[in-house]
Each structure stands twice: as C-alpha cells, then as structure tokens.
C-alpha cells in the first residue's frame, strides 16, 4: 500500500496560508522539488489545485514566465508533469495531468492508496483535515517558517481528535526554516 503524506509550509504560529511564510528560496525549492519527485501522484482539493495550476502549469506558449527564477524551474517542471487527483464536488472537469475524483472520500482515497506506485502527496488545508479525521494520513511533513503570521488559516484547524505523532526526520535550512516529518504514533494500550 502506498503511503499518503501531507506536506505543507507553515509558520511558527500554525498559519498555512501560502503568502504567510517567507518567500521560497533556492534551498527550499530544491527540497520541495525532491519531495515532489518522490510522489507517485498528488491529491488536491479544488482550491489548492486551482492555485497550484495557476502558478506552476507550463504556459501553452512553452517558456516559463519571466517572474520565475531559474532555480524554480525544476520544481515547476516536476509538479507540471506529476499525476494529480482532484477532490471536488463543484468542478465539472480538470486537466493538467489530473483526474477528478468524486464519491465517498474515504473509499476513494483507500483505493488510490492500494494502487501500485510511489506514495501520494496531499497539500492544502481543508482536504488534509478531512483525511486526518479519517485516519488516512501516513506521514505529516511541515516546512516550518521562522515567521509569526498572527492571522490566516491554521494547520488542521477543527480536527476532531488529537493525533499523536512521532518525529522521523528533521532538516534545518539556512533561512531558519525547519522541515519536520512525522508519522502517527502507535496507539498505546
């Protein structure tokens, strides 16, 4: 069974709005590129899918936009070609190497996890909370930014039950950010 990893940038006070942290730098983009390369597929809700598509889809004209630094292109190429599943009840269709998935979320995600291949990565805010409530997330990966946002959507807000985690990996960045990877801790008797 392929694992499902929730990966997201988050500030020290738990804000996970994409503009709340420090802007990406070369080191963090290399890190996220390597993580995306390990993904067999990406799982997005509608909002995250549309946001990522607007930023990272290769333009129909071919070249990447002028705003993109050279060191962002490997990430853009990786996410652009990645297989994507989009959970949405409001979108009529998707493209960008994506498939629209509907129906019972737990059943759909369990089926995706049972397919052969590398792990699944999920990003965003709302969908990961629902998946955590269902106990479907196998790893949590947070790139913690050295910023206090003071506002914005917070990490897993509204989670029904507490989830105990154990640290399995840690990586520090020159910017002061820290990548932390956790797995749910085994239940204690």
Image (cartoon, rainbow, N blue to C red):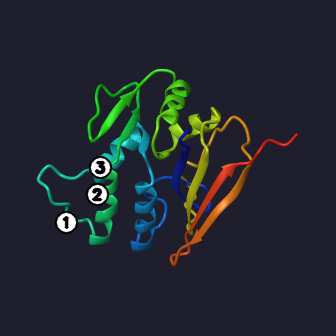
For marks 2 and 1, give the CA distance.
15 Å
Residue 66 image label: 1
Which of 100 and 21 lies nearest the eye of the viewer?
A: 100
Say if mark 2 contacts mark 1, CB within 8 Å.
no
Q: Residue 172 appears in which quarter of the rendering?
A: bottom right
Q: Residue 142 appears in which quarter of the rendering?
A: bottom right
Residue 118 in the image: above or below residue 88 = below
**x then y, percent, for residue 71:** 32, 71
**x then y, percent, for residue 118:** 47, 46
Q: Which SS class for mark 2?
A: helix
Which of 82 and 132 lies nearest the eye of the viewer?
A: 82
Which of 177 and 81 lies nearest the eye of the viewer?
A: 81
Q: Which SS class for mark 1?
A: loop
At horizontal 32% and vertical 37% (from top left) the residue drawn is 98
For marks 3 and 2, give the CA distance.
6 Å
**x then y, percent, for residue 157:** 62, 43
| Sequence-earlier tag: 2 or 1 | 1
At horizontal 53% and vertical 41% (from top left) the residue drawn is 2
Crowding around mark 3 (Cα neighbors within 10 Å: few <14, some 14 to 19, many 20+) is few
Say if mark 3 contacts mark 2, CB within 8 Å.
yes
Residue 77 image label: 2
Residue 81 image label: 3
- Split into 4 quadrants, where in the image is the C terminus? top right
Q: Residue furthest front?
A: 116
> Is residue 23 visible from the viewing direction of this image?
no
Count of numbered tags: 3
- In the picture provided, is 67 more to the left or to the right than 187? left
For marks 1 and 3, give the CA distance.
20 Å
């Amino acid at each position: 069974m392929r694992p499902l990893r929730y990966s997201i940038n988050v500030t020290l006070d738990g804000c996970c709005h994409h503009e709340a942290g420090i802007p990406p730098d070369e080191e963090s983009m290399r890190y996220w590129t390597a993580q995306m390369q390990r993904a067999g597929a990406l799982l997005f809700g509608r909002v995250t899918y549309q946001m990522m598509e607007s930023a990272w889809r290769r333009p129909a004209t071919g070249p990447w936009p002028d705003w993109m630094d050279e060191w962002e292109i490997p990430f853009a190429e990786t996410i652009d070609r990645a297989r994507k599943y989009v959970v949405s009840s409001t979108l009529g269709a998707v493209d960008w190497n994506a498939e629209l998935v509907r129906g019972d979320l737990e059943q759909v995600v369990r089926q995706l996890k049972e397919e052969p291949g590398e792990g699944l990565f999920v990003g965003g805010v709302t969908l990961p909370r629902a998946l955590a409530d269902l106990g479907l997330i196998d790893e949590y990966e947070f790139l913690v930014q050295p910023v206090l946002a003071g506002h914005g959507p917070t990490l897993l807000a509204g989670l029904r039950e507490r989830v105990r985690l154990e640290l399995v990996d840690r990586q520090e960045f020159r910017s002061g950010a820290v990548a932390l990877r956790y797995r749910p801790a085994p239940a204690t008797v």
